[in-house]
Image: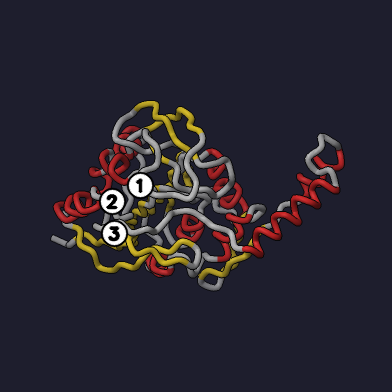
Amino acid sequence: MDKSTFIFGYAPNFFQLFQTSLARWLVFLLRLNNNSKFSTEMCQLIKPKTKVNFEGREIFFASGHGRLKWRAETFHSEEPMIIEWIKSFSSQDIFLDVGANVGTYTIAAALRAKQVIAIELDPANIYCLHTNICLNNLQEKVLIVPIASSATKSIQKIFYRDLSLGDALQSVGREQILPTRKNAPFSINQLSIPIDTLFNEYDLPKPTRIKIDVDGNEETVLAGAWQTISQAEEIYFEVNGLEDDLLLLQKFYEYGFSIIKEMPSNVGSVKSDVSRNLLLRKSVS
């Protein structure tokens, strides 16, 4: 696949930059960053959430951050193909969400499927994922797996762009290879477990539907997941124009999967010409 000049990551417009400057001025004026009782109470009381309608039901997402608000408000428009896919889930499906982030699709899937297993490596996102699960009273239907997924059971260095809620593009075992607007300024050592090991050692129910959205970490994640993948019925998979994408797709084909639907990936209002969301289905023998 040919790479283009498409850059991953968010770029604020002039109005958003103005809002940020105004908010920064108000924080300074009200001395909200001071260690005072007033600033502490203010921070604890400000807990905005965004309401989204999904199949006639209201669901809620914590949105006390610009990126979180954007994720909630683009619930239907960012990846419409995955929303339609989730609507097809039955009450017997087990959904594995690899790269769950703050749970945008975990929450929707939990309303349709029997159980959701949500894998996320970013501690800040895990906190928000947990919050969103509780906001929607789905604690009994969602299992959070707070680890990195890779080819080996080991300690891996995870590279981060920042500490903000809802961030993506973290990289496992090496610096991010996708072109991003912001480089990773720090890394931290974290536990990594192959997905196959996770399901075998903890006797988890085998997923029938799997979403894999891991921002350039596809090769290392899939290397430890083919047994689990081979038993699934459908896979929602994002490719990013990397050389390994074709090899990974060939592996899916060898396990009996074929692409039944695809669409270009979006980042905000920008349509990528290298990244694609694919829906693969396993042929019935």
Residue 9 seen: yes
Residue 89 seen: no
Q: Residue at x 33, y 36 (%)?
A: 150
Q: Disc 1 vs disc 3: which is toward the camera?
A: 1
Task: Check disc 1: other Cα within 10 Å, few if <14, some if 14-19, many if 20+.
Answer: many
Determine contact: label 1, label 2, CB under 8 Å: yes
N-term-proximal mark, 1 vs 2? 1
**Cα distance in 3D space between marks 1 and 2:** 8 Å
Rendered-image quadrant of the C terminus: bottom left
Q: Disc 2 vs disc 3: which is toward the camera?
A: 2
Which element type, helix, strand or loop, lies under badge 1?
Answer: loop
| Residue that numbered label 3 is attached to | 234
In this rendering, is residue 229 above or below 146?
Answer: below
| Residue that numbered label 1 is attached to | 216
Amino acid, disc 1: Gly
| Residue that numbered label 2 is attached to | 242
In this rendering, is residue 22 above or below 184?
Answer: below
N-term-proximal mark, 1 vs 3? 1
Determine contact: label 1, label 3, CB under 8 Å: no
User: Where on the picture, by quarter, is residue 280?
Assistant: bottom left
Rendered-image quadrant of the N terminus: bottom left
- Foreground of the two, 113 or 51: 51
Which element type, helix, strand or loop, lies under badge 3?
Answer: strand
- Foreground of the two, 71 or 61: 71
Which element type, helix, strand or loop, lies under badge 2?
Answer: loop
The picture places residue 18, in percent across and down from the top left corner, at 70, 60
**Cα distance in 3D space between marks 2 and 3:** 22 Å
Q: Residue at x 14, y 52 (%)?
A: 254
